[in-house]
Image (cartoon, grey):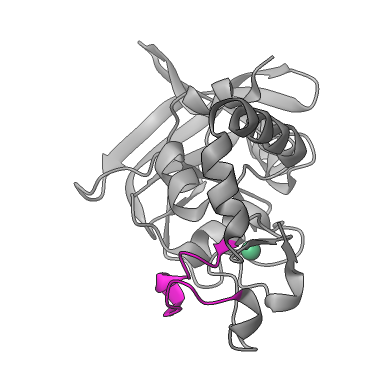
Amino acid sequence: MKYKAFHKLSYGLYVIATEFEGKKAGYIGNTAFQVTSSPAQIAISCHKENATIDGILKSKTFSISVLKKESETSLIGEFGFMSSNDIDKFRNIETITAQSGAPIVLNSSIAWFDCKVVNSVDTGSHILIIGEVLDSDIISEDEPLTYDYYREKYKMLAPKNAPTYVESEKLKKEVISENKVQEEPVSKVEAKSELSTHTCTICGFQYNEEEGDPSMGIAPGTPFAELPEDYKCPICNAGKDYFTEG
Ligand code: FE
């Protein structure tokens, strides 16, 4: 099986949120797709260990906020890589309450859907949840964020609980074997370079020394060791100690 083939499937990125007994929960998912038009139904796939799923199944409601292309990185970091059991992800977030009672995240959102759960399917690690759309609206005409753009921009892998998660070692092996076959001369050139990559162990963001981190004011060519001591991962805010080489 070729794992990189799965990266050719197109997705967007969405904040899925719910509220049960006064507790809001939410996460970022790439699996939200329209199942039928009449009635309008949308399905999501949620990991069983995801803190939000409990609230969705108990409240039988969820909202979907469609993220825009240039979304707030702190929003992606907190909703994508942290657990609603550990932090209040909504403390700095602007929301409105949907007809169903679910909170709708407005930050970085261009459209939203309010859904009531009408069916669910246990798929093993995840539960496929089908919701009937009760209401929807457009917030702005900005471009939606695609999973492909997100991967390219941040050089990131899917979080462990995502349906699209592939172990990074499997992907690396594919890349290495491709380089050996097709690009022997290029890898020799790369071998001369002293510049390397460091990966955030919390969220998977990769700091590439050749590219620097313009979003944090770090010039291209800056070695990881020369980053300021208070450098933080632009996605999840983790400090330098959380990065490993490679
Ligand atoms: Fe990070």
* Residue 176 lies in quadrant: top right
- Viewer-proximal residue among 22 and 184: 184
- Magenta segment, prevailing SS (helix, strand or loop): loop
Instruction: Identify whether 60 is placed above or below 97.
Output: above
- Relative to 235, 69 lies left or right: left
Pick the front one: 159 or 40: 159
In the depicted structure, whether residue 61 falls above or below residue 241: above
* Percent coordinates x, y for residue 1 in the rendering: 69, 14
- In percent of width and height, residue 103 lies at 49, 52
Q: Is residue 110 visible?
A: yes
Point out residue 63 in the picture as x, y percentages from the top left corner: 48, 41
Q: Check residue 222 for magenta coloring.
A: yes
Quadrant in which the C terminus is drawn = bottom right
State yes or no: residue 186 in magenta.
no
- Is there any visible trace of residue 29 in the rendered image? no
Taking 206 as reference, is 242 left or right?
A: right
* Quarter of the image where one finds residue 83: bottom right
The answer to which of 182 and 240 lies nearer the viewer is 182
- The magenta stretch is 207-223
Q: Residue at x 54, y 51 (%)?
A: 189
Q: Ligand 1 shows up in which quadrant of the image? A: bottom right
What's the residue at 56%, 21% (across, down)?
Answer: 5
Q: How many numbered marks, from 0 up?
A: 0
Please report the residue visible at 34 percent of the width from the left and 50 percent of the height from the top. 68
Give x and y (percent) for residue 223: 58, 76
- Based on the displayed image, in which of its 4 quarters is residue 44 positioned? top right
The residue positioned farthest toward the left in the image shown? 141
